[in-house]
Amino acid sequence: MIRKLLIFCVLALCTVTLMPDSVSADNPIVQTRHTADPAPLVFKDTVYVYTGHDVDNSTWFVMPDWRCYSSKDLVNWTDEGSPLSSKNFSWAGDNYCWAGQCIERDGKFYYYVPMHPKGPGDFQIGVAVADNPTGPFKDALGRPLIATGYGNIDPTVFIDNDGQAYLYWGNPQLRYVKLNRDMISYDQTVGKVDVPLTPGGFGSHPGGAGGRTNYVEGPWFYRRGDLYYMAYAAGGIPEFLAYSTSTSPTGPWTYRGIIMPNHLPNLAFTNQLGIFDFKGKSYMFYHNQNLPGGGGFDRSVCLESFAYNPDGSIPTILPTKAGPPSASPLNPFNETRAATIAWEVGIQTETSDTAGVYVTNIEDGSFIKVETVDFGKKGAGAFAAKVAGGGSGGSIEVHLDGVDGVLIAALPVTDTGDWSKWKTYTTKVTRTTGIRDIYFVFKGAPGQKLFDFASWKFSK
């Protein structure tokens, strides 16, 4: 994120918003809240993306917590709730949960995050640890890991093949330390290292004043084969995405060019990326401002697929509304959380101790799309949903391939007696086979909250 801006530049560029053209669009990947600064983690058969959370209608980067979403297919994303916030750090102030990254080592998950300290001072970087990728995380040190100088934001972490871990960060400077094996300390005799920001290493800024380079912030560090990549937000306002490469994890770096140009108004005036491989293909997260109510301070995470060129260079990646195709079909015969969503209109998600993350704010006409669902050759015969409600109730209609598509089930939902009392309802399904998109369309009295929705399952 850009931190040192002239306010008139910010206000001039942050107010443009585009509504999605179609309910079939799949970017941004989350529609229930504004998200930013995506950081992916691939663990076993699942991709986790950790994001910031932009407060609605904000006029600055007000971000109360970090969020986590998971997917096995890259089109349906399950809301895992908030695994961490600045409130988990006794030394940190509120509402500055900016860009961080999580990594796994030896069965533990380490989440490096920047926060503003309580009282005076510039940003500092903390580290939290958990036993699971979805948390809960807790402060591993009780103090900052990095608290030297200024510009301590946007940490990126990587473990090399020899076991050495590196933590890079910074705006406007790029810095790094070599982490110790415990992932929560580093050699204080060496300390932090400033990377020389040369035009040959990071490109010449179009203005060129004072030898300024393209590097701004949001570094993303990784290795592919024998080549190390440093991708980052570049150029100033508005930001584009660029990258440099090296044959060493500490440089020297060679500037390789632009990954994603800034396409206002399709993108926000900031951008942040995370690159990863999954099931043999390559992908890049970034953020835009295209949800209703979006803007430069209300951003939304998106995803694109790409293929490296034969020489290892990254092609130009342009933002799309469709996003990548499914990496694998979803199995509807497993119980699936209702907060597993490809696209939605008119719902929200909340968390409870009994139901975990569930869908709420359901009203007449709101819906959830779940993409690439494989009913197989035999198909489904019944549909079950776990719901709760103390209101008038309603129904869940299951449609194929669109909100007005073929109706295969209509499940009546009555008052369960309390909003915290969960009950499973079941109904028959018109036999459906093959791979289809399904839409859960909610019906009931207009203008009322109908019920809450925790999970669903088809049966053969």
Image: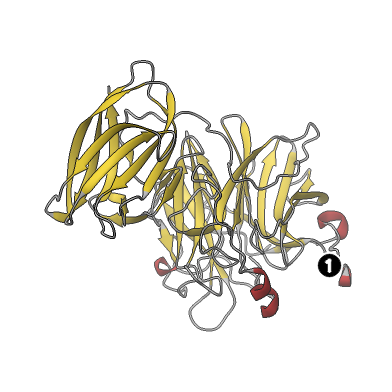
Question: Label 1: few (<14), some or many (≥20) within 10 Å?
Answer: some
The image quarter containing residue 15 is: bottom right
Closer-to-camera residue (403/135): 403
Residue displayed at 86% across by 68% down: 207
Marks counted in the figure total 1
Q: Is residue 24 left or right of residue 154?
A: left
Q: Is residue 299 left or right of residue 393?
A: right
Residue 100 at least partly seen: no
**Vertical order, 250 against 432 (above or below):** below
Q: Is residue 273 left or right of residue 213?
A: left
Is residue 283 positioned above or below 149 on the image? Answer: above
Q: Residue furthest left?
A: 417
Q: Residue at x 87, y 72 (%)?
A: 209
Q: Is residue 446 visible?
A: yes
* Place of residue 196 in the rendered image (x, y in percent of width and height, measured from the top left): 80, 62
**Which residue is the extreme one toward the top?**
377
Q: Which residue is mark 1?
A: 212
Instruction: Indicate the position of residue 255 as horizontal and vertical percent values.
Output: 82, 51
Residue 27: x and y, percent?
55, 47
Write the residue at 78% across / 47% down: 245
Amino acid type, mark 1: Arg
Seen from the viewer's position, the closer of residues 199 and 193 is: 199
- In the rendered image, residue 364, in percent from the top left (x then y), is placed at 30, 52
Q: Name the foreground residue: 54 vs 193.
A: 54
Figure quadrant of the N terminus: bottom right
